[in-house]
Image: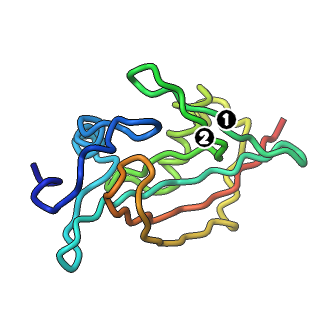
Amino acid sequence: KVLVKHHIALEGFGVGSAKHTHELQHEIEVHDCSLQLVESTLERVVEPVVVRIYYGPHILVNTEQQLEDGRVRPRNQLLVEKKHPEESWESAAIRGIKEELHIDLNVHPVMALLRKDYEFLEETRNSPSYPGLVCRYRLHYVPCQVLC
């Protein structure tokens, strides 16, 4: 209802590689994103933590993502985990490595976050996941080196 109230067309949601409205609702409920009104424009605010995992000269890349309805969409991106409001970017990076790669760095320290090379960037653009909804990305970039 909030989307329609702010003139966001819903026809593109759940089509092609776009996600469904119930997935946006879930992201909001689990604090993966929030909706904010900025100068009368509804914006989805997300804090992705982008982890560049290096193994020698190689960088780990996620080639595709399977959506909950079974569709597969190409990704070709680095490991990305959405930071929750109450956690640090470091905690989100470690959580992402655990969820995506099944490696708990607190138990098996086989990688090291290169904290000195951390970068932060904020940008606003249209969301490919939710067509027509402007998204403010508060991006946290951190390199990570495989140690073994």
> Crowding near pointer 2: few (<14 within 10 Å), some, many (20+)?
few
**Alpha-carbon distance for marks 2 and 1?**
5 Å
Tell me which residue sits at (55%, 43%) in the image. Answer: 94
Give the camera-side residue of 48 and 73. 73
Tell me which residue sits at (90%, 48%) in the image. Answer: 57
**Who comes first in sequence, dot 2 or dot 1?**
1
Which element type, helix, strand or loop, lies under badge 2? Answer: strand
Instruction: Identify the residue position indicated by label 2 in the image.
Output: 75
Residue 85 placement (x, y as % from top left): 32, 56
Callout 1 amino acid = Thr
Rendered image quadrant of residue 60 = top right
* Residue 63 marker: 1
Give the camera-side residue of 93 and 18. 18
Residue 116 placement (x, y as % from top left): 68, 67
Q: Work out which residue is located at the far front of the displayed protein and give it.
A: 11
> Crowding near pointer 1: few (<14 within 10 Å), some, many (20+)?
few
